[in-house]
Image (cartoon, helix red, strand yellow):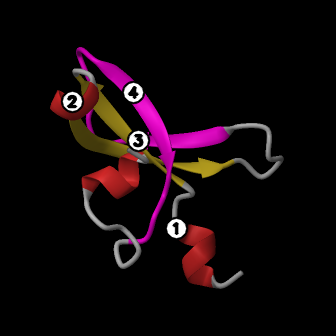
């Protein structure tokens, strides 16, 4: 592992409102695995007041092909 991959979060956190094609995904933070591998440390840039929080594997920008690639839809 390089220093870049060690510091890069393993997951992104999204606030999702709605369902299906009409859902709205807002990036709200990131997650890193804990040293013991039994949990995650979360950093939130905002705290959602409604909707749900979904944690997805972090895909580097050069690999992502838009929001649907990140959502896995």
Question: Counting residues from the N terminus, which is met first, the one under dot 3 or under dot 2?
Answer: 3
Counting from the top left corner in percent of width and height, residue 69 is at 37, 57
Categorize mark 3 by other alpha carbons within 10 Å: few (<14), some (14-19), many (20+): many
Question: Counting residues from the N terminus, which is met first, the one under dot 4 or under dot 2?
Answer: 2
Q: CA distance from mark 4 to mark 3?
A: 7 Å
Q: CA distance from mark 3 to mark 2?
A: 15 Å
Residue visible at 52% across and 67% down in the picture: 8
Categorize mark 1 by other alpha carbons within 10 Å: few (<14), some (14-19), many (20+): some
| SS type, badge 3 | strand
| Snapshot quadrant of residue 19 | top left
The residue tagged 4 is: 53
Counting from the top left corner in percent of width and height, residue 3 is at 61, 82
Magenta stretch containing residue 53, yes or no? yes
Question: Counting residues from the N terminus, which is met first, the one under dot 1 or under dot 2?
Answer: 1
Q: Which residues are magenta?
A: 40-60
The residue tagged 2 is: 23
């Amino acid at each position: 592992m390089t220093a870049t991959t060690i510091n890069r979060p393993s997951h992104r956190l999204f606030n999702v409102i709605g369902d299906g094609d009409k859902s709205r995904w807002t990036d709200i933070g990131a997650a890193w695995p804990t040293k013991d591998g039994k949990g995650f440390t979360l950093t939130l840039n905002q705290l959602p007041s409604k909707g749900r929080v979904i944690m997805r594997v972090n895909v580097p920008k050069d690999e992502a092909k838009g929001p649907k690639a990140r959502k896995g839809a």
